[in-house]
Image: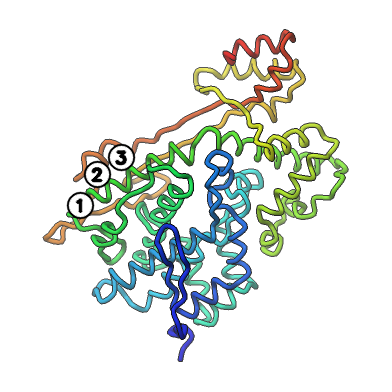
Amino acid sequence: MEYSAEKLHEEKVFKDPVHRYVHVRDRAVWDLIGTKEFQRLRRIKQLGTTYLTFHGAEHSRFNHSLGVYEIVRRIVDNVFAGRPEWNEEERLLSLCAALLHDLGHGPFSHSFEKVFDLDHENFTRMIILGDTEVNEVLSRVSADFPKKVAEVIAKTYENKLVVSLISSQIDADRMDYLQRDAYFTGVSYGHFDMERILRVMRPTEDQVVFKHSGMHAVEDYIMSRYQMYWQVYFHPVTRSSEVILTKILHRAKYLYEHKYSFKHKPLHFYSLFEDNVTVEDYLKLDEAVVLYYFQIWQEEEDVILKDLCCRFLNRNLFKYVEFDPAKEYKKLTRLSVLFEKAGIDPEYYLVVDSSSDLPYDFYRPGEEEERLPIHLMAKNGELRELSRESDIVDAISGKRRTDHKLYFPADLIEKGRGNSAIKEISELLEL
């Protein structure tokens, strides 16, 4: 029997708090789950530093990847199977791409990427195409199968219907993380009727569409996503921990570049500091490794690195005030001068952080990023763009919401009371 069609003698299941069970019957999928590159995802948190705000948010990229796979499995096996628009030969490709879509995430993903100018999607493709256990398993299907999986994840694969399953404005990736993140953070915002959405899904030549009768379930999903971004993903306390994490990494890189003598050599970071990261180096990084260095950096001679690591590990985070960069840039300039006078380095202790989200949009010619719209299918087969049919979605379509906050160490300011610079800082920050 060809490897691509090989099934396990007995179906394997993972107990899952969101989907109840994740079902695996394909030999290739089971073998991929067992690779060391996929198992590494157990050591990468799905929500980065959010556990410092919502203490239950300890779930991993491994959890999420299995969830995305399970949603796609249900779609292709239960919803699309037998429909003329669906090519059954794309089934295994869809399952593998769903399972591996987050393979290249690093520790504390987005903060890490910003500091070291990395792209997790590039690393996902490099792991899939490189000398790895994942590549070896995929190559058993066919010589060009790893390339096809990488193309689906890169959104360049010729069959756009397959791409849309894991990368669109309503896809398996988002449907899993909204529900999973809501479950583990304990909030009620991320819940929506996924069962209904799956029932009204229909394949077309180049994307998934939804029966018009399911519009309200899709509206519910859009609003859930909107609420989760502002109540969980952009929570100001989580952003404070991300600011400190980012500054720790910046400081460590700065010290390395200026020949600082670390008590414990940060061997795992050398290739990052030197902008020369190989796949092998990257795969050695996980959050256990990063937190180990933060732990030992608490004993460094450098006061800033030591303090920032203590803050992160002991959750002594920065406070924040609302900030409008367009109107308050002079205040920021003045605060920077005052921080210097007070002996507090503004480069590390006075930080403007911005969050921005576009809950739903449709493609407008000439824009940088093409956002394929969500389409509803009428009884006569006609496709209608969601915001034209839904007043709720129309109200938020194309409306980018942006929020700015100014972060600072209130404890250091409190300790310096009596200093004239600190007094003016307190007045400007209205402390």
| Residue 50 vs residue 321, the one in the foreground | 50
Circle nearer the N terminus (3, 2): 2
In the rendered structure, the answer to whether residue 249 lies left or right of residue 28 reads: right
Q: Is residue 71 above or below residue 7?
A: above
Instruction: Assess whether mark 2 and mark 3 are in contact (beta carbons under 8 angstroms).
Output: yes
Residue matched to label 1: 384
Callout 1: few (<14), some (14-19), or many (20+) C-alpha neighbours within 10 Å? some
Residue matched to label 3: 397
| Secondary structure at numbered mark 2 | helix
The quadrant the N terminus occupies is: bottom left
Residue matched to label 2: 387
The quadrant the C terminus occupies is: top right
> Residue 68: image x %, image y %?
43, 61
Q: How many marks?
A: 3
In the rendered structure, the answer to whether residue 409 lies left or right of residue 225 reads: right
Instruction: Assess whether mark 2 and mark 1 are in contact (beta carbons under 8 angstroms).
Output: no
Q: CA distance from mark 1 to mark 2?
A: 9 Å
> Residue 423: image x %, image y %?
68, 9
In the rendered structure, the answer to whether residue 390 lies left or right of residue 13 reads: left
> Which residue: 24% across, 44% down?
387
> Which residue: 73% across, 8% down?
418
Amino acid residing under circle 1: Arg
Amino acid residing under circle 2: Ser
> Residue 66: image x %, image y %?
48, 64
> Which residue: 63% across, 32% down?
317
